[in-house]
Image (spheres, grey):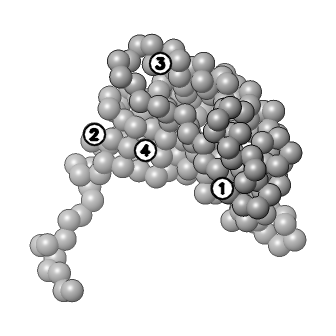
């Protein structure tokens, strides 16, 4: 297919509606398939850093039509960013109809941050691959008790958010990768909310 230059739509500040943003390259997990791994299961050679609230504000200056932003943990876990709740509040204030999604292993970060994110109506996707003792087979170094604690705080914040919003959608989500060692945990995770 040969497209002429005039037929191409260029992305600019007026037609950009969604961003996938890696706001941190830090993570406590040691998952066997992580791209952060270097030789002999050590950390790959790169500088761990996070995006600040000021950098987010500067980057989005003049961009007015965003409806979706995803903070995904392909390189690091967004919840390691100490300013994650402040960034979320800034974005929710700037973009009134924004759908903010945060992917996390759930075992890192301050419970207060999860609560604040729930109150803001941010959608958090918890990457949990089994109950206690099984989850850690894939999500190495991720403490299941901390996931439970953080998820409960997030739920408390969501309850507060939903009480202020009519017809609020479900925002709590679990990403569960099924494999032989955890398939028996799937039904209990769904049915009992463990």
Q: Secondary structure at mark 1?
A: loop
The residue singled out by tag 4 in the image is: 69
From the top left corner, tell me how far across and down residue 25 is, in percent.
Answer: 66, 52
Viewer-side residue, 154 vs 82:
154
Mark 1–mark 4 CB contact (< 8 Å): no
Q: Give percent across and percent down for residue 36.
A: 72, 62
Residue bearing the label numbered 3? 161
> How far apart, in angstroms, are the residues tagged by discs 4 and 3?
19 Å
* In contact (CB < 8 Å): disc 2 and disc 3: no
CB-based contact (under 8 Å), mark 4 and mark 3? no
Q: Position of residue 45 (x, y in %)?
A: 75, 66
Q: Which residue is mark 2?
A: 64
Q: Residues within 10 Å of mark 2 (few under 14, many from 20)?
A: some
User: Does dot 4 land on a helix, a strand or a loop?
Assistant: strand
Image quadrant containing the C terminus: top right
Q: Earlier in the sequence, mark 1 or mark 2?
A: 2
Is residue 7 among what the camera can see?
yes
Closest to the camera, between mark 3 and mark 1, is 1
Secondary element at tag 2? loop
Q: Residues within 10 Å of mark 1 (few under 14, many from 20)?
A: some
Mark nearer the N terminus (1 vs 4): 4
Tag 1 residue? 177
Give the secondary structure at mark 3. helix
Residue drawn at (63%, 39%), measured in percent from left and top? 190
Measured in 3D between alpha carbons, the distance from the residue under mark 1 to the one under mark 4, in whole angstroms, is 23 Å
CA–CA distance between discs 4 and 2? 13 Å
Q: Is residue 181 above or below residue 167?
A: below
Task: Please give the label number shown on residue 58.
Answer: none
Indicate which disc, 2 or 3, sits on the residue closer to the N terminus.
2
């Amino acid at each position: 297919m040969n497209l002429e230059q005039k037929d191409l739509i260029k992305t600019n500040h007026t037609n950009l509606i969604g961003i996938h943003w890696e706001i941190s390259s830090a993570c406590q997990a040691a998952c066997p398939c992580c791209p952060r791994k270097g030789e002999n299961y050590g950390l790959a050679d790169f500088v761990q850093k996070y995006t600040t609230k000021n950098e987010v504000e500067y980057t989005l200056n003049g961009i007015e039509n965003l409806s979706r932003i995803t903070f995904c943990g392909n390189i690091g876990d967004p919840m390691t960013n100490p300013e994650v709740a402040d960034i979320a509040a800034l974005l929710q204030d700037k973009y009134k109809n924004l759908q903010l999604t945060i992917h996390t292993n759930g075992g890192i970060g301050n419970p207060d941050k999860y609560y604040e994110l729930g109150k803001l109506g941010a959608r958090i996707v918890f990457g949990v691959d089994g109950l206690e003792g099984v989850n850690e087979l894939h999500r190495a170094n991720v403490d299941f008790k901390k996931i439970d604690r953080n998820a409960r705080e997030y739920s408390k914040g969501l309850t507060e958010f939903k009480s202020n919003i009519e017809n609020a959608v479900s925002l709590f989500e679990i990403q569960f990768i099924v494999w032989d060692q955890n398939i028996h945990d799937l039904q209990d995770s769904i049915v009992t909310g463990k």
